[in-house]
Amino acid sequence: MKKLNILVACEESQAVTIELRKLGHNAYSCDLLKCSGGKPQWHFNMDVFKVIKNKGGVLQNGKSVTIKGDWDMMIAHPP
């Protein structure tokens, strides 16, 4: 199975992101709110359009990440 770069937008709970990680994908959550799922190392606390354009950004834990290649998929849960 190919490891996909997946961005889960409008997801502070990280429920989907955590399950995608369990399947072996390179998944990140993104929301204007801080994450409540307990994985700040997988959460962009910023505007999703900046994350898409820059292929990453600064994670909630303060570390910067840039994905290799492009985003393969985005799942969005707008309010």
Image (spheres, helix red, strand yellow):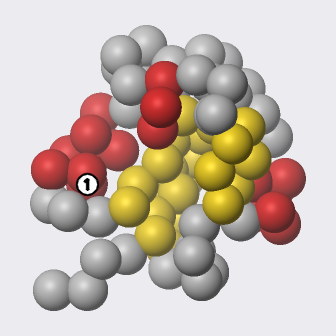
Q: Nearer the viewer, residue 60 or 29?
A: 60
How far across and down, in percent of the image, does residue 29 sit? 50, 41
Callout 1 amino acid: Leu
Residue 72 seen in the current view: yes
Instruction: Quarter of the image for the C terminus: give it.
Output: top right
Q: Residues within 10 Å of mark 1 (few under 14, many from 20)?
A: some
Please say if 8 is above or below 46.
Answer: below
Q: Nearer the viewer, residue 71 or 12?
A: 71
How far across and down, in percent of the image, does residue 43 sit? 54, 34
Q: Is residue 45 left or right of residue 42?
A: right
Q: Is residue 23 left or right of residue 58?
A: left
Please say if 38 is above or below 24.
Answer: above
Q: Nearer the viewer, residue 52 or 11?
A: 52
Please say if 33 is above or below 19.
Answer: above
Q: Quadrant of residue 67?
A: bottom right
Residue 11 seen in the current view: no
How far across and down, in percent of the image, does residue 35 sit? 51, 19
Determine the residue positioned at 20% across, 62% down: 24
How far across and down, in percent of the image, does residue 36 sit? 43, 13
Determine the residue positioned at 25% across, 54% down: 20
Q: Is residue 65 left or right of residue 47?
A: left
Task: Report the residue marked by disc 1.
Answer: 20
Instruction: Quarter of the image for the N terminus: give it.
Output: bottom left
Please say if 56 is above or below 15.
Answer: below
